Image (tube, rainbow, N blue to C red):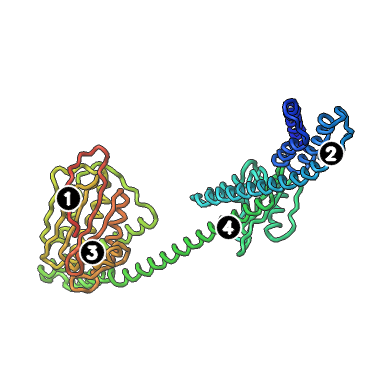
Amino acid sequence: MRLLPYLASAAAVGIVGVAAYVLTRFVPLPHVSVLFLAAVVMSAALSGFWPSVFAAVLSVAAATFFFYSPIFSFRVADAQNLADLAVFVIVAAFTSRLAASVRAQALEARRGQETIAGLLAFNERLAGAGSDAELHASILEHLAPVLGRPIHLWLPQEGQLAAAASLGGDDPPEEVRSAAGRLMAGGDAALAGWRLERLATAQAPAGVIAAREPISPADPEYRKALLGHAALAIERARLRREIADARIRVQGEALREALLNSVSHDLQTPLAAILGSASALESFGEHGDARARRELVSTIRDEAERLASYIDNVLDLTRIRSGQIAPRLELVELSDIVNAALRRKQKALGGYPVAVELPPDLPMLRLDLFLMEHALANVLDNAAKHAPTGSKLSIVAAVQNGEVLLDVTDGGSGIRAEDLERVFDAFYRGAGREGAPASGTGLGLAICRAFVEANGGSVSAFSAGPGRGATLRLRLPIPEGAAATESALTDD
């Protein structure tokens, strides 16, 4: 039994008694016992029912001894004073019960608020976990004050119970591990000095937590709520992993199917041309026509370069999907990137007049020269595939809002509004020059976007509609401290 509430009740009665004694020296009070109700009510509100009963008993004793004749005696001679004390006892009992009930409700409401606040903080922390390890650590850190410390978490893995996280101690004893396994299987897991809790959702068991029992156990309902939220968080994380794995498998299957389609259609064309030209050369023997020989050799070279380009795109896509793109940033001039890309695609652009407009005061950019040259070459190659021979291609650069904007515009078949985002999807091929799907693997712009984003930039497409050409815009960040003059570009 705690003595402090009773000592506080005695002190309250003493304070009221002194105040009543001082007051009766100046004002006659026939019903002095009424003043002691203040001590009773205060004790009930602060300490509960039984301390208030103690205060009522002390109040009756104090009023009898100090205020009712005969003074300094517990005997009451006046019947009216006895009636006052009887009424005081009845009112004090009723008031104590009422005040104690209000106090209990207030404490219950406060505990409810603290429970809700604790659960909200727990859920916020679980929701902010960026990885499984962080999630498991957050669960143990929040449950340790409730269940005890050290605390350990086991999760099912491939049909067995595997240790996921620990807090506040070394590896648990083997008997704790065995008890956790029994509890996970639905058996009895009582173990002296340890509290073992089974985490479970409506679908399946989620894991087991074992902790040293605390000196003062927490509220059972609060503990149960925390364990339920922890189980749900672990189950959500497991479902997210399964969904992500399934999505990766689906994407892998789609990529594999698209790659097989690409190999069976696009890669066979240059291979057939190379094999046919080589067979023709072989049939000529030593006396074949020199001009025909040169044409066949040229065909072999062109188709081999075309095949190499396809293979490079497939390899680049593989590098992107495996996360192997690591740019080597250095200060470069945009004109160097543009000129290198034009040289790379010189044959593909042979039938197109290309207009290049680069302001002379463009700032230096911190980019990977090879990746950006490759990205711009893919944009130029894409423009040549979708524009009629002889149509004009333009390359225009400008500075806006701390970025260099590089626009490549063609006069080709254009892009429908609903396809503007799809043009950057792997294996997507828009309409070619005659309306049929364009040649190639459909990887060029997907690789372009990956390379540009690896350099900290972005790429987007604009088009006024089918048959009205298209513009591919590369946004490249300007390094801090680089001088830049603002200029304007118009979206097509």
Which mark, residue 260? Answer: none
Earlier residue among tags 1 and 2: 2
Disc 3 and disc 2: Cα gap in Å?
Answer: 119 Å
Picture layout, residue 112 above or below residue 288:
above
Where residue 214 appears, x then y in whole percent? 70, 43
| Front residue (pair 393, 326) | 393
Residue 488, which numbered label?
1
> Residue 398: x and y, percent?
18, 49
Distance in Å between CA atoms under marks 1 and 4? 53 Å
**Callout 3 environment at 10 Å: few (<14), some (14 to 19), or many (20+)?**
some
Q: Of tags 1 and 2, which is closer to the observer?
A: 2
Residue at numbered disc 2? 80
Residue type indicated by callout 2: Gln
Name the N-terminal-most of marks 3 and 1: 3
- Placement of 16 over or under 111, stated as above or below: above
Question: Which comes sooner in the sequence, label 4 or label 2?
Answer: 2
**In the rendered image, which quarter is residue 348 located in?**
bottom left
The one of 34 and 430 positioned closer to us in this rendering: 34
Task: Give residue 306's mark.
Answer: 3
Which residue is painted at 17% across and 69% down in the image?
467
- In this view, the mark in front (4 or 3): 4
Q: Is mark 3 on a helix, strand or loop?
A: helix
SS type, badge 1 = loop
Residue to which mark 4 is pinned: 232
Question: Which amino acid, by three-letter code, is at mark 3?
Answer: Arg
Question: From the viewer's perspective, is residue 446 above or below residue 36?
Answer: below
Left or right? Give the position of 29 relative to 136: right
Per the model, the C-alpha gap separating discs 3 and 1 is 37 Å
Evaluate if marks 1 and 4 touch, with contact meaning CB atoms under 8 Å apart.
no
Q: Residue at x 17, y 50 (%)?
A: 488
Please give the name of the residue rendered at 17% of the width and 53% of the height, measured from the top-left corner: 489
